Image (tube, rainbow, N blue to C red):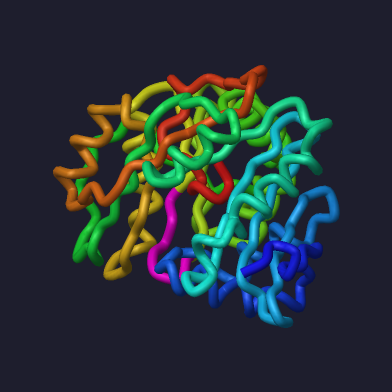
């Protein structure tokens, strides 16, 4: 199969159905809203590969305020693998991101080997954990109650997220809060927001994350609150592997480890954020 026969072009909103077919075929958790968030922002880069007028591959990069470009949705139809399609897509998108200060992604162990060939380096490990539908929320003794996130809190949440994540993700944060307000919670101490939990609906699981806080105890308070509206529903979280106390607590309340992701960066990492205060990520597609 000749690589010249593959056509690369920008992904349009009208291509979402084809993107969903590719991600569904891999058993991924993305929804049409996730694809729309990626494609709908002209600052992001979303590309697809076509062969004989059939969409057979995708890749995307979210532009986080020209600080970090986050590569995601690297998908190739199984029928067309082994012909260099993913390499073609990655070379294309990396060329478009040459002016970006930092490029990152979360890779599976299989993908890790591929990305190392593109000069990506390991940063840290993330464990995907899932829970079957819970019949009740675990009791957790608290000294403070979470509050729903309101419009007036968004800028302070964005500022805290920028400090912890390492880059300004204002578009993502606003979208999560506005699209899924019932999954958005904050903690205040001394009248200052010190932690928050966001979430979104998925095709297979409800995702809790990102969750950031100053300590594990506050994270447990936020996760417990998030779980209260998810009784009898499957849940997924992606937790940094160095958060052993949190992982053990999640296992104790019914979560099971499923797989590992490797956070990676290309060439340099000028925006590492504060991983010590980052507990749950938003998911490998958003960081």
Q: Does the magenta stretch include residue 91?
A: no
Q: Is residue 228 left or right of residue 133?
A: right
Residue 151 in view here: no
Question: Residue at 27% across / 70% down in the picture?
Answer: 232
Q: Is residue 205 magenta?
A: yes
- Please name whichever residue, 91 or 38, is drawn nearer the observer in this view of the structure: 91
Q: In this view, does 114 lie above or below 85?
A: above
Which quadrant does the N terminus fall into? bottom right
Q: Is residue 168 above or below residue 230?
A: above
Q: Where is residue 259 in the image (x, y as percent from the top left)?
A: 30, 48
- Please name whichever residue, 210 or 242, is drawn nearer the observer in this view of the structure: 242
Q: Where is residue 215 in the image (x, y as percent from the top left)?
A: 38, 23
Report the residue that reaches farthest toward the left: 252
Q: What stretch is highlighted in magenta?
A: 202-208
- Please name whichever residue, 282 or 158, is drawn nearer the observer in this view of the structure: 282
All told, the count of numbered labels is 0
- Please name whichever residue, 66 or 250, is drawn nearer the observer in this view of the structure: 66
Residue 262 in view here: yes
Displayed quadrant of residue 191? top right
Question: Residue at 56% across / 61% down in the picture?
Answer: 83
Displayed quadrant of residue 95? top right
Q: Is residue 192 left or right of residue 236?
A: right
Q: Is residue 194 above or below residue 29?
A: above
Question: Residue at 69% across / 62% down in the picture?
Answer: 3
Q: Where is residue 174 in the image (x, y as percent from the top left)?
A: 70, 49
Question: Residue at 32% across / 25% down in the picture?
Answer: 242
Q: In this view, does 237 lie to the left or right of 120?
A: left
Which quadrant does the C terminus fall into? top right
Report the residue that reaches farthest toward the front: 2
């Amino acid at each position: 199969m000749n690589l010249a026969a593959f056509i690369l072009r920008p992904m349009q909103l009208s291509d979402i159905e084809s993107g969903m077919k590719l991600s569904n075929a891999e058993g991924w958790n993305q929804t049409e809203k996730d694809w729309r968030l990626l494609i709908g922002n002209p600052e992001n880069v979303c590309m697809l590969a076509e062969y004989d007028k059939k969409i057979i591959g995708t890749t995307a990069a979210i532009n986080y305020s020209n600080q970090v470009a986050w590569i995601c949705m690297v998908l190739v139809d199984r029928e067309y693998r082994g012909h260099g399609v993913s390499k073609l897509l990655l070379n294309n998108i990396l060329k478009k991101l040459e002016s970006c200060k930092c490029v990152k992604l979360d890779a599976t162990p299989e993908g890790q080997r591929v990305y190392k060939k593109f000069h990506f380096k390991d940063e840290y490990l993330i464990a995907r954990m899932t829970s079957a539908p819970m019949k009740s929320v675990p009791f957790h003794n608290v000294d403070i109650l979470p509050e729903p996130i309101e419009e007036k809190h968004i800028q302070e949440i964005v500022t805290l997220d920028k400090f912890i994540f390492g880059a300004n993700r204002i578009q993502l944060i606003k979208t999560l809060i506005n699209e899924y307000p019932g999954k958005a919670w904050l903690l205040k101490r001394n009248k200052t927001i010190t932690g928050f939990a966001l979430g979104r609906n998925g095709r297979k699981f409800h995702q809790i994350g990102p969750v950031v806080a100053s300590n594990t105890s506050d994270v447990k308070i936020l996760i417990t609150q998030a779980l209260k509206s998810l009784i009898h529903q499957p849940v997924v979280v992606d937790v940094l592997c160095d958060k052993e106390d949190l992982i053990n607590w999640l296992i104790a309340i019914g979560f099971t480890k499923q797989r590992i992701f490797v956070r990676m960066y290309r060439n340099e990492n000028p925006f590492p954020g504060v991983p010590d205060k980052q507990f749950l990520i938003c998911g490998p597609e958003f960081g």
